[in-house]
Amino acid sequence: MLILLSGDNEFERSRYANALVDEFVKKHGNLGVQKFSFPENSLPEVVDFVRNFSFFSPIKLCSFQGFDSATLGKSDLKDFLTLLELVKKDERNVILISATKLPAEFNALLSEASITKEFSVPESRSLVDFIQKEARRRGLSLTDSDASSMIESFGNDLTGMVNEIDRLSFSHENIQKDDYSGYELFSAISKLRYSKTRAEKMFYLEIIFSYLDADAGHAFNLLSATAPKSERAEDWYARFADYDVAVKSGNLNYEEVLLDFALK
């Protein structure tokens, strides 16, 4: 049995794939479930898993999430396709493949797979609706302006958006103030994070402190939580870890740390 998932919408694609795996585990247990990835795993490992059955795992699920055919040589790709041909009608084996784009060599399999599904990134209005729907699931309410700010920050990275919504939901009670929406703080933090000039950073820092009257520690935590795409994540998190050490050692406070960030 083959399941072929594709499309740029990695978040929805992964959520759907994980739901299928969860459903399989409910019915058959987790002993017969294995995640594979090339080149971390070799093709012989996959073949061994598919061929070897036991009393405790008479049905197996082999999952490839984030599949990239470029990690396979031509010979291995040909052998992998042969394996898929053998498995497609085998009810004892399920091979789930999830990829941004399936290779052209898979085209012949699409009509014979048990499940094929493509996940596209929503258009602008639908993307706003998606963000607001995910926020409602977490007990939050985001305006169109809030959602547009998130789109500006994350582009089509739906996983990044949902992670940011999760962070907002975890700190929901902390960011509510008497006379402003807590999500204006998120917008200002996002602008600060992606600002390229010192003047822009100082402008948004002034909004955060003077207009929104935000707690500096909370603003620091929101800012440090997500690295902008223009920087290596490791460098971003290391810089804020150093800032955190400076605060905890009493050398700086959070206001001074944020000012230092804006001036650099």
Image (cartoon, rainbow, N blue to C red):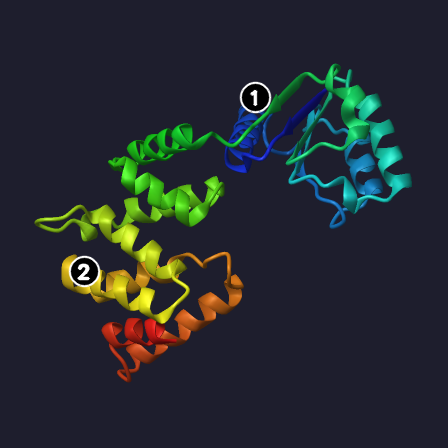
Residue 51 located left or right of residue 237? right
Q: Quadrant of the C terminus?
A: bottom left
Residue lying farthest bottom? 251
Checking the image for residue 43, the label placed there is: none
Task: Tell which of 36 and 262 is nearer to you.
Answer: 262
Task: Tell which of 169 and 61 is nearer to you.
Answer: 169
Q: Residue at x 28, y 40 (%)?
A: 145
Q: Quadrant of residue 253?
A: bottom left
Residue 244 in view in this figure: no
Neighbourhood count class around disc 1 (C-alpha, 10 Å): few under 14, some 14–19, many 20 upward: few
Tag 2–tag 1 contact (CB < 8 Å): no
Q: Residue 254: percent from the left, percent from the top?
A: 26, 72
Residue 72 in view in this figure: yes
Residue lying farthest left? 178
Which mark is first along the chain, 1 or 2?
A: 1
Q: Residue 39: percent from the left, percent from the top?
A: 76, 49
Above/below status of 193 relative to 129? below
> Mark 2 and mark 1: span between their CA atoms?
49 Å
Q: Amino acid at mark 2?
A: Ala
The residue tagged 1 is 27
Q: Residue 91: percent from the left, percent from the top?
A: 73, 17
Look at the numbered disc 2 and give the secondary structure of its residue: loop
The residue tagged 2 is 214
Look at the numbered disc 1 and give the secondary structure of its residue: helix
Q: Amino acid at mark 1?
A: Lys
Q: Residue 31: percent from the left, percent from the top?
A: 64, 34
Q: Quadrant of the N terminus?
A: top right
Task: Tell which of 193 and 119 is nearer to you.
Answer: 193
